[in-house]
Image: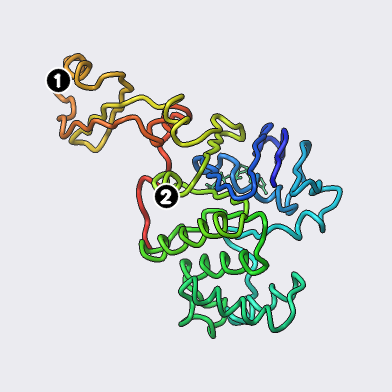
Amino acid sequence: MLEVIDLVKRYGEVTAVDGVSFHVAAGEIVGLLGVNGAGKSTTLETIVGLVTPDSGTVTVDGHDVRAHPERARAHIGFAAQDTALYPRLTVRENLRFFGRLTGASRHDADARADELIGLLGLTEQAGRLAGVLSGGEARRAHVAVALMARPRLLLLDEATVGLDVRTRTHMLELVVRAARESGAAVLFSSHYLAEVESICDRVVIIHRGRVLADGTVAETIGRHAKSAVEFTFGDGTRQRHEVSDPAAELPALLARLDTGAGAPELKSVNVLPASLETAFWALTGEEPAGLVEEVA
Ligand SMILES: Nc1ncnc2c1ncn2[C@@H]1O[C@H](COP(=O)(O)OP(=O)(O)OP(=O)(O)O)[C@@H](O)[C@H]1O
């Protein structure tokens, strides 16, 4: 359904996307992972046609996004991080408007808007102006807009940021249903590895605009993850060491610790089993931002 081939996008000196290739099949949910600035949003915006790439190709259901933007976009539902709602229309009016824009009859647009308002828990907010929504409410409204036309390709850019746990769970269920019941191809950018692990068939990890891994969660862990031992010190600093066998290697790591005068006191030792998180860390050298959960 979605084919991205050798995409490159430069902003002056910065190469935001540097030869990215991957695909998403109908009915498949693919997680797009990367630290801040990795190139996730630029990739998504290029797929939608909001950003023009320097080179590379994007096709949606066989339609080249640059050559036939209308044909390609007709299949896409995009929930951006921060756009797209008309602040002086209510949530319900926004949904109806976007529904009509994609060719639905008035009756169908109204019915679909009401359905999504219910599904995304926006009943209380439906009559409010979009401009006064909280961050979490606006995210839900963006996802509702993206789902209005029952898209065959659903692009979600950090759609669950700032949502409380119940709303987040609910939204993830909707995404899974869009793929499993309606056969949508879903590309889902996120920092939250746990949710990516729970719903995604495959993950694509990008770093500094390049794809470092593309495979199922199990494949990614098998290929790239190692166990790790993490030391936390009294001054708040942490050290992580990749290990094959934590129990066997821990004594040697402890013996190497600086215990001299002025060295920070060791507060805790944490053994991290091989996981998507340790794979991400091994590949990028960084922790995913979502490890520190934020809740609105
Ligand atoms: N319009 C722009 N002009 C200049 N630089 C840009 C522009 N858009 C993005 N960049 C740069 O390109 C790089 C990739 O940005 P992008 O927003 O795609 O990352 P991201 O992975 O979505 O990050 P985040 O998780 O913070 O949303 C960053 O270094 C960013 O500063």
Rendering coords of residue 211 (x, y %):
59, 32
Q: Name which quarter of the figure residue 193 lies in.
A: top left
| Crowding at mark 2 (Cα within 10 Å: few <14, some 14-19, many 20+) | some
| Position above or below: 185 against 167 | above
Q: Which residue is mark 1?
A: 259
Distance (Cα) linking label 2 and label 1: 39 Å
Q: Of 155 and 176, which appears nearest the observer? A: 176
N-term-proximal mark, 2 vs 1: 2
The type of residue carrying mark 2 is Glu
Q: Of 185 and 129, which appears nearest the observer? A: 185
| Crowding at mark 1 (Cα within 10 Å: few <14, some 14-19, many 20+) | few
Which residue lies at the image location 43% right of the left edge and 44% below the top edge?
Answer: 197
Evaluate whether residue 10 shows in this view. Answer: no
In this rendering, would 151 be left or right of 54? left
In front of the other: label 2 or label 1? 2
Marker disc for residue 195: 2
Q: Ligand 1 is located in which of the four quadrants?
A: top right
Which residue lies at the image location 38% right of the left edge and 31% below the top edge?
Answer: 278
| Position above or below: 46 against 246 | below
In this rendering, would 29 be left or right of 93? left
Marker disc for residue 117: none
Rendering coords of residue 187 (x, y %):
59, 49
In this rendering, would 289 be left or right of 93? left
Q: Tag 2, which secondary structure?
A: helix
Rendering coords of residue 239 (x, y %):
29, 28
Tally of numbered tags: 2
Which residue lies at the image location 55% right of the left edge and 50% below the top edge?
Answer: 188
Evaluate whether residue 184 shows in this view. Answer: yes
The type of residue carrying mark 1 is Thr
